[in-house]
Amino acid sequence: MKIKLPRRAVAAVASLGLVLVAVPTVAPAANAADACGLGETCTGALTGSLGDSAFQITMPPEFNGTVLLYSHGYRIAQPVPAQIATALRLDQAPYYSETTVPGIGPAYVGNGIPQVAPSAAAAANLLGQGYALAGAGYANQGWAVAEGVEAGQNLITHINSGAIQGVDEIIAWGDSMGGLITQTLVESNPGKIAGSLPLCGAMEGPLQAFSTAMTVLYTWQQLIDPTLTVANYAPGQAGYAQAVGDLAKVFGTINAVASGEATVSAAGFPIGQANLLAGLMAGLPTKSGTYDGVSVNPAVGELGLGAALAGGFSPVSAGQNSAAAMLQNVAAAAALGIMGRYELEQRVRTIGGFAPTDNANFNNNVPVVYSNLLSQEQRFEFESTFAAAGPGVLDAMLNKLDASVGSDTARFPANPAAVAIVEGLPAAKATYNKPAVFITTTYDPITPAGNQFEFFERMTDTKKAQRADDKGMLKAVEYFTVPLDPEYTQFEPGATGPSATLSALATGGSGVGHCSFTTDQLVGAVGAVAGLIDADTRAEVRAAKRVGYRPAGVNRDRLFAPPLLKRPLATAN
Amino acid sequence: MVKAFATRAVAVGAVAALAFAGGVAPASAADPGVTNNKITLGMTTPLTGPASLGYEFIAPAAEAYFEYVNANGGINGRDVDLRIYDDQYNPAKTKIGTNQLINRDRIFAMYGALGTPTHSAVVRDLNRRGIPDVFVNTGGASFDNPRRYPMTFPYFPSYIVEAKAMAYYIDRTRSLDSKKRCLMYQEGEFGDDSKKGFKAAGMNFAEEVSYFSGQQLAGLSSQVSTLKSAGCELVVFFGVTSATASLLGEAAKAGFAPTWMVTSVGSDPDVIGGVVGSKRVLNGVYTPSWITPIQDTRNPYVRQMKVIADRADLPWNFYTYYGINTAYVLAQALDAAGRNLTREGLVEALENESRSFRSAAEVPFRINSRSHQGLTGFYMARYNSDIEAERITNYIMTATSSASGKAKRATFRQPNPTRKLLP
C-alpha cells in the first residue's frame, strides 16, 4: 500500500534520514585541540543540526587506547508529578531536574546532563582497567534516537579530532533506548567504531516498544478505567494534562489494589487479574524486584490456606505472586508507556506539521485480536489464578477486549502518516558488520527480553554472520542475566507480605527489573566485546565469548530463548 | 551459540520431517545424559503441596523400578538415573525445575512430567531443544500433537477419550441414563477437555459446576450445595484426587448421596480414605480404568510390580502401581532404541515399536508418526463393598482425542509380560 505523507512530513523525515547517512556539518563548541588529560574529566557541548548536546569525557589514570562511547537511555521529556516521580526514584537520579508545573506542583523532568556509563561502580572499574569513558546528554529528551545518534557522531568526531590522545579504537555501548542508538551509530559509522554493546536495548524500535504499552493501556481502558485516553493525546498542554491524568489514574489504581483498598473495577472485573492479563498479553514478565512469581508466604504452610487468607498473609499462591509482580511491572512501565507516547506523538505532530485535530497515533490496534496474544502456555499457567476470581472471568475479559475488533471508534486507529514518520526515525537494521555483544535482563518489564533477542537472531541469521559462524568466527553473542536465586521473594518471620529489601538482595541485582546488571556483568560484557575485536582465531573468539559468561548471574544455558515478543498486529485475522 | 541453536533447531525439524516420512532420523553422537554406563532422566512432579496427594508415590515407584532394572544389568548395560524435581504442581516452579534438570543435571530425556498446567509451561521449550518428553502424566489432549510437539509422548488416555468412554457407558446403562446428571470439573484444560469429550459424545448435563486448582483446600461446600440444590442424581467428576476427597467428604457431611462417576486419575481409595477418614465414601462409585485392577494379584504384571514395590518398601496403591508400570514401558522403549542410544533413536523407537511394548494396560497402546496418543481407551469399573475397583464391562471403549466422534466398543487381549518384568 502506498502511503501518502504531507509534504512537510516527507521533508522532515528526509532530513532526519540525512542525519544518519551523512556526517552532519558540525562546529564543535569545544576546542578540538584541548586534549583531555589522563585522570581528568572534561565536559563541553557540541552543536549539531538537532541542537546542542553536552558531553563528558573521563580519562583513566593509564589509558589502554580504547574509548567506551556510552549512549544513555530514555529520559522523560515532560515533567512527571513529584509523587509519581518519587515512586519511580526519578527524584534521586541526577538526570532528572526538579521543576514546578502550574496546577500540578513539584515535578521532575529529564535533563541533558551527559552520562558516561550505566553506573558509577561500572565506570570506576572500567577506568581502573584503562578505558576512557565518553558520553553525551542529548539535545532533547524523549524518544531522542536521532539526537542520540547525532550526539554520538559529533562526539566521535570530537574525540578523533584530538580530544583524546592515543585512541586505538572506540567501542559503542548504551542501555535501553541507548542500545538502539548504539547499534544505529555502529551501522552508520562502521569505519569509526570497532564494536558494540547494546544493553537491554529497545532494538525493535518505537512501534514495537509502544505497542507493548498500547496493549497494557487499552486493556486497562476496557477492563479497569474507561476514562483513560490511551493514545492520540491532544497537542500541547491539553495533551500533557491528558497524559499526566492517565499516569495518575494508573498509579492511583495500582496503589489502591496493592493496599487492598480496591479489588474490582467499575466495569466489574477483578483489577489484579485484569492487570495480570494486560501484562501477559503485552509480554511483560511475571517477576518483579520483589515478587518472583513462585513463592508463597510461609504462613500458608504454617496456618493452612484458609487461615492464611483470613490473616491477610500474601501471596498465598504462585499466581497471586505473579499478579503482584505484574502490578509492580506495569507501574514501572507506565511512565514510559504514557509520557513516552505523549512525547512521541508531539514529535510526530511537529515533524508532520499536523493540524491540531489530526490523529497522531502510530500504533494501530483496530485489527488486534487480543485473545490471540495470550499464548496457550500462559493461559494454562494462569488459568487457576483467573479462575480464582470466578469461573469464566478470563473468557469474559477476553471477550470484552475482542468485541471491539475492527471498530475505528472503540479502538485506536493509526494515522498512516504518523506511522510513516515513526518508521522513518533512525533505527538499526540488524546488520552484522562489527563485533556485537548484547546483554539482556531476562525479566525486564520495559524492554522485554524478546526485543533484543529477536534483533540478535535477525543479525546472526544474515548471510555474512552465517558465513562467519560456519568458520567459527561469528563475533556476536547475547548474554542473559538471571536472578541469583530463582526463588528470591523473601519474608521477615511472621510478616504478612514479602520484604522488598531482602527480596532485592536475593536477586543479587541481576536478571529482574529494567536493565538490571551487576558491575561484574557489565564489565564482563565489555571484556567480551574487546576480546572479540582482537580475536583472530576460532579459539580466541570462543575465549572472548566465555569472558561474558563468567560473572555470577549470567545464564550459561547457551540454548536459552526468552518468550517470543508479542506482536499485536500479527494476531489480526 | 547461534550455531548450536541452529543445529538443534534443525535436529528437531528433521525428527519431525522424518517422522512424517516414516524414515529414520540419523543418529547423533553424544547426546547429553548418556554415558557408557548411565542414562540420566528428569521428572517434574508434585511431591509436596496441595495437589500432591497420591501423586507423590509415582516418582518413588519409578525410581524403585529403575533400581530393580539397574540391579539386573540395566538397559543395554546402562543404569538409569532418575532425577526428580518437586514442582508442587506449580507451573512457575516447573519452569525452574525443568531448567535445572536440563542445565545442571544434563538429562537425556524428560520422563513422566506430571500435570497439564505445569507441563504446558515447559513443553514448547523441551521440544525446541529436541529433548524427548516421554509419558507425560496428564490426560491433557494438547500434548498429543506430533506436528507441534514432535518430542512429546503422552501415556494414559486423554480426558477427552475418558469423557467419551463415560458417555458411552452412561448412554447404554439404563440405571444411569435415567438419572438427572450433573458435571463437576476442575477449571482449566482438565475440565475443558472433559467437556469437549462429552460434547463430542452428544451428552448434556442438567447442571455444571467447577472448582479451581487449590480451592479444595478451602473446601468445596458451595459446589456440593449447588449440586444438591439442583437435585443431581448422577454426578460426573473430573478433578484431582485431593479434590475428589474434599468433594465426597463434603457431600457425606451434607447428606448428599448421588451416584458418583469419578475420573480415573482422581479416585485412589488410600488417598481418599486418608483425607476423609474412611474409604467407604467410594462404595458404589464408578470410575473408568485402563489398567488391570490393582487387587488382581493373579495377574503377572500386578504380581511382579507388587514385588518391586514391596522390596522398595513402598505402599501398594494405584499410584505406585502406575509409576512402576510406566517406568516399565519406558525401559522397553529405551531398550528398543538400542545400544547406540540417542534422542532421535528413542523417538524412532517410540514411533515405530510401541505396539510391541508390554504393560498392565488392558487397552491398546498406539504411537506413530501421526499420533502420539498413547493408550486409547477404558473399561468401566465400580468400587465394591471392599472398596476395590471391580471391572464391570467385559469390553473396552476406545476413542481418539479428537473433538468429534464417539467412543466405540472393542476388545483387547493383554500380552504376557517380559521375563521378570525386565526390558
Image: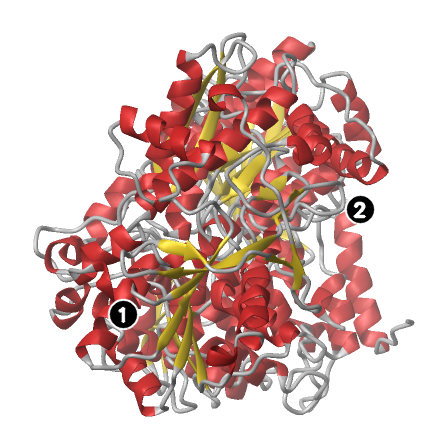
The amino acid on which the numbered mark 2 sits, given as a three-letter code, is: Ala
Residue A121 in the image, given as x and y percentages of width and height = 34, 34
Depth order, front residue of B123/A54:
B123
| Mark drawn on residue B63 | none
Could you tell whether A337 is left or right of A431 in the image? Answer: left
The C terminus of chain B: image quadrant: top right
Q: Quadrant of residue A543?
A: top right
Query: Residue tagged by mark 2?
Result: A22
Packing grade of label 2 (10 A; few <14, some 14-19, many >=20) is few
Return the chain for callout 2.
A
Mark 2 and mark 1: Cα distance apart in space: 77 Å
Q: Is residue A168 visible?
A: no
Q: Is residue A53 above or below residue B331?
A: below
Depth order, front residue of A19/A300:
A300
Residue A439 in the image, given as x and y percentages of width and height = 53, 37
The amino acid on which the numbered mark 1 sits, given as a three-letter code, is: Leu
| Mark drawn on residue B248 | 1
Packing grade of label 1 (10 A; few <14, some 14-19, many >=20) is many
Element type where label 2 sits in the image: loop
Q: Quadrant of residue A389?
A: bottom left
Depth order, front residue of A48/A364:
A364
**Going by the picture, which residue comes out furthest to the left?**
A494
The residue mark sitting in front, 2 or 1, is 1
Depth order, front residue of A407/B410:
B410
